[in-house]
């Protein structure tokens, strides 16, 4: 199964795996799954680290991506155009871009973020 990991899932997996749900852990450990992470998530980590809101280095993020065998999903114009039709259920621009990607790609998101459930047609795994 192809899945898109939310930013928090990568962070949890890298520095506090006990915060992952059993289902999320099973998804990450199943080698048959295709794990993807938005390039937006890497930008979010870098920006929030620079602002002092997160404490995760590029090396730790890169190692987590490699260790989990994650493919980085580029953010495309098609993903951005999906934002035009996305209701404003919450204002986090990083989350909105990740949601738009998942909807555009028609893949579920592995996330603990409850607000994601407000978006019609979005499949969530937690």
Image: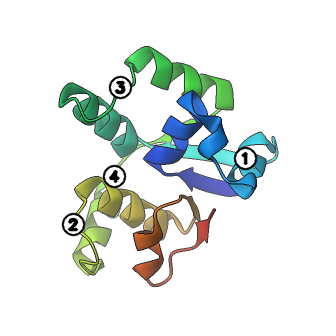
Query: Residue 38, can we see it?
Result: yes
- Tag 2 or tag 4, which sits nearer the N-term? 4
Q: Quadrant of the N terminus?
A: bottom right
User: In screen coordinates, is 109 left or right of 1?
Assistant: left
Q: Earlier in the sequence, mark 1 or mark 2?
A: 1
Frontmost residue, 4 versus 113: 113
Circle 4 sits in a helix, a strand or a loop, which is it? loop
For the residue carrying disc 1, how many other residues have a C-alpha within 10 Å: few (<14), some (14-19), or many (20+)?
some
Marks 3 and 4, how far apart at CA: 28 Å
The image quadrant that residue 13 belongs to is: top right
- Indicate which disc, 3 or 4, sits on the residue closer to the N terminus: 3
Task: Specify which label sits upstream in the sequence, 3 or 1.
Answer: 1
Looking at the rendered image, the quarter that the C terminus falls into is bottom right
Label 3, label 2: how far apart the Cα atoms are: 23 Å
Badge 2 density bin: few <14, some 14–19, many ≥20, Cα 10 Å: few
Kindly report which numbered mark, 1 or 4, lies closer to the viewer in this rendering.
Answer: 1
Tag on residue 91? 2
Residue plotted at (73% across, 51% down): 27
Disc 3 marks which residue?
55
From this view, report whether residue 23 is shown above or below residue 70.
Answer: below
User: Which is closer to the viewer, label 3 or label 4?
Assistant: 3
- Kindly identify which residue carries mark 1: 25
- Residue underneath mark 4: 76
């Amino acid at each position: 199964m192809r899945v898109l990991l939310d930013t928090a899932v990568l962070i949890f997996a890298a520095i506090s795996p006990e915060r992952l749900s059993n289902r999320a852990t099973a998804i990450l450990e199943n080698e048959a799954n295709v794990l993807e992470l938005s390039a937006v998530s890497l930008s979010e980590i870098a920006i929030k680290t620079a602002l002092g809101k997160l404490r995760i280095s590029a090396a730790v993020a890169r190692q987590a991506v490699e260790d989990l065998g994650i493919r980085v999903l580029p953010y495309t114009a098609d993903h951005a155009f999906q934002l035009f039709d996305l209701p404003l259920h919450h204002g986090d621009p990083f989350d909105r871009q990740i949601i738009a990607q998942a909807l555009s790609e028609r893949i579920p998101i592995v996330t603990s973020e409850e607000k994601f459930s407000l978006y019609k047609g979005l499949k969530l795994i937690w």
